[in-house]
Amino acid sequence: MVTDTRGPRNWSGIATAYADSFAHLCAGTIPDLVAHALLDADPSVLEVGAGSGLLSARLAGAGARLTSLDPDPDMLRLLRSVVPA
């Protein structure tokens, strides 16, 4: 077994490349995730590993009370540019 010792630095320095490529491949799950999150009358969502913020933006736009986290500072910058509040 190989252990990646980079920990939260896995995406360090490549956040923009991720946002322009792989993030869009993962975006296909967003409609279902948003639909399930909004089943409650007053939805509150914690998104851990929010990455580029595609899901966070949709959840916030749909009215969820949202807390989004990511360990990588570059990803957080992208996230804040999409969901500034």
Image (cartoon, rainbow, N blue to C red):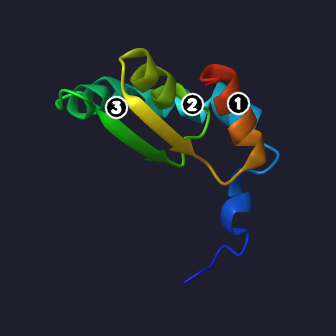
Residue 4's disc is none
Amino acid type, mark 2: Gly
Q: CA distance from mark 2 to mark 3?
A: 13 Å
Residue at screen point 17% across, 30% down: 39
Q: Earlier in the sequence, mark 3 or mark 1?
A: 3
Report the side of 21 relative to 6 (left or right): left
Residue 27 coordinates in the image, percent (x, y) = 44, 28
Residue at 73% x, 68% y is 6
| Residue 9 lies in quadrant | bottom right
Residue receiving disc 3: 29
Residue 78: assigned label: 1
Q: Secondary structure at mark 3?
A: helix
| Callouts 2 and 1 close, C-beta under 8 Å | yes
Residue 43 is situated, as x and y percent measured from the top left of the image, at: 28, 32
Mark 3 nearby-residue class (10 Å; few <14, some 14–19, many ≥20): few
Within 10 angstroms of label 2, few (less than 14), some, or many (20 or more) residues? Answer: many
Q: Residue at x 62, y 29 (%)?
A: 21
Image check: 78 left or right of 67?
A: right
What is the spatial separation of the Cα atoms under label 2 and label 1, in whole angstroms? 7 Å
Quadrant of the snapshot with the N terminus: bottom right
Taking the spot 18% from the left edge, 32% from the top edge, the residue there is 40
